[in-house]
Image (cartoon, rainbow, N blue to C red):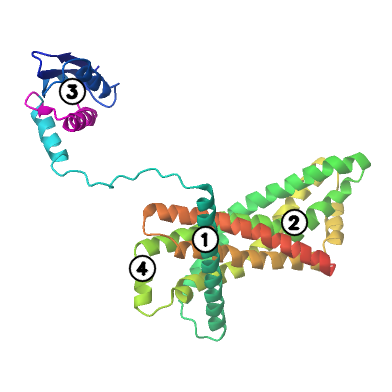
């Protein structure tokens, strides 16, 4: 345990006795105690230290001494460091060799409310312009691909298709199967009251095929693949690999973004169809296992309820979501800063942007289908 003592051998000398274990792991005395003792009597002209009883020390002791030295320098009190251990003296000399530059410390500044609103509005407008410019560049790259002028490696496209397609099947299977189970449970609770349990097949089939399968797949891919895209491109931005591509005259939009966008556009409809089947299977398990519906009854009811219009709307949802997830991940990755923390922020921002875009697109498509009567 650290101990602190004081002594005044004469009116001009003040001695600080340091004893015990002065480490950050224990409770250290405050430098303000020395200040109180100095101000309680005749003003001292010299301060000395007695560290004979010191059994251990680390940076906690140095922090304490630096605060005491700072106070003494401000009050013209001479410091005698001879009584301190040699290691402490060397570290203090090193710490005080170069004076601190004024303004080097970051001071907490309170931003006025309207100034904060203005800065947020400017940042939002700047972000919106960057997003529109990125979408425009991606569109140009896609058109160039259709005309055969885009430059990217087909190997990258197939690798990304595998990573965002086949490797995503386990998590898509689990989530959509559980969603189908949940929809069937919720619907069964109400339909049992009217003896209409058979219509659980209609609820699960239409909901999964029309929108829920695409939404759940999109959200899964936003958290899995969109964040991966942002982390990959963010790391390349940090390592200046994207700058190297531009120096070589290779467009990062064609070489990096286009293969990822194409891969998700192609894989998302296939994953959506698979998710629809897994969701219907979840409803089938509840209907057959708990509601006394025969397998053939459930099959025929689902077949009668689900039509090609619902399937087409779901596939359209999934294709749009694939583009949104890819653009969100690549956009945040290309906007990433030059630090390790910026990569994590880019991945987080990519997931948030993709999910918000998915929900917004779902609302727009649903409203449009209602207006068109489909």
Above or below — where is 119 with respect to 20?
below
Question: If you read the primary sequence from the N terminus, does the residue marked by circle 2 or circle 4 appear first?
Answer: 2
Label 2 with label 4: CB-CB less than 8 Å: no
Question: If you read the primary sequence from the N terminus, does the residue marked by circle 3 or circle 2 appear first?
Answer: 3
Above or below — where is 140 with respect to 81?
below
> Mark 1 highlights which residue?
122
Q: Please tell me the numbered disc located at residue 333.
A: none
> Mark 3 highlights which residue?
56
Question: If you read the primary sequence from the N terminus, does the residue marked by circle 3 or circle 1 appear first?
Answer: 3
Distance from disc 3 to disc 1, alpha carbons, whole Å, reads 54 Å
Single out the mark in the foreground, 3 or 1. 1
> Mark 4 highlights which residue?
241
Secondary element type, mark 4? helix
Q: Left or right: 161 with respect to 249?
A: right
Could you say where residue 255 lies in the image, as x and y percent from the top left? 45, 74
Question: If you read the primary sequence from the N terminus, does the residue marked by circle 3 or circle 4 appear first?
Answer: 3
């Amino acid at each position: 345990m650290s101990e602190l003592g004081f002594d005044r051998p004469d009116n001009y000398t003040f001695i600080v006795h340091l004893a015990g274990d002065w480490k950050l792991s224990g409770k250290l005395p405050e430098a303000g105690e020395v200040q109180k003792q100095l101000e309680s009597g005749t003003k001292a002209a010299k301060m000395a230290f007695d560290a004979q009883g010191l059994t251990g020390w680390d940076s906690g002791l140095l922090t304490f001494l630096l605060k005491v030295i700072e106070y003494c320098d401000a009050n013209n009190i001479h410091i005698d460091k001879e009584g301190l251990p040699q290691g402490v003296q060397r570290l203090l000399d090193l710490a005080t060799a170069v004076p601190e530059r004024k303004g080097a410390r970051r001071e907490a500044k309170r931003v006025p409310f309207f100034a904060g609103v203005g800065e947020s509005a400017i940042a939002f407008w700047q972000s919106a312009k960057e997003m529109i410019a990125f979408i425009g560049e991606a569109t140009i790259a896609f058109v160039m691909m259709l005309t055969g002028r885009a430059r990217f490696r087909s190997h990258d496209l197939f690798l990304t298709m595998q990573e965002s397609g086949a490797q995503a099947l386990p998590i898509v299977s689990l989530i959509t199967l559980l969603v189908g189970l949940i929809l069937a449970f919720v619907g069964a609770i109400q339909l049992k009251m009217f003896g209409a349990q058979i219509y659980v097949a209609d609820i699960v089939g239409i909901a999964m095929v029309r929108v829920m399968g695409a939404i759940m797949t999109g959200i899964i891919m936003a958290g899995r693949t969109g964040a991966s895209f942002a982390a990959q491109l963010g790391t390349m931005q940090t390592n200046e690999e994207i700058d190297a591509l531009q120096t070589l005259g290779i467009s990062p939009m064609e070489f990096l973004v286009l293969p990822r966008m194409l891969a998700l556009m192609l894989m998302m409809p296939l994953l959506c169809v698979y998710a629809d089947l897994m969701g219907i299977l979840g409803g089938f398990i509840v209907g057959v296992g708990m509601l006394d519906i025969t397998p053939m009854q459930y099959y025929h009811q689902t077949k009668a309820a689900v039509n090609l219009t619902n399937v087409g709307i779901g596939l359209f949802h999934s294709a749009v979501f694939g583009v949104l997830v890819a653009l969100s991940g690549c956009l945040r990755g290309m906007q990433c800063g030059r630090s390790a923390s910026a990569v994590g922020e880019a991945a987080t921002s990519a997931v948030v942007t993709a999910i918000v875009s998915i929900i917004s697109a779902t609302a727009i498509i649903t409203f449009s289908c209602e207006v068109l009567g489909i």
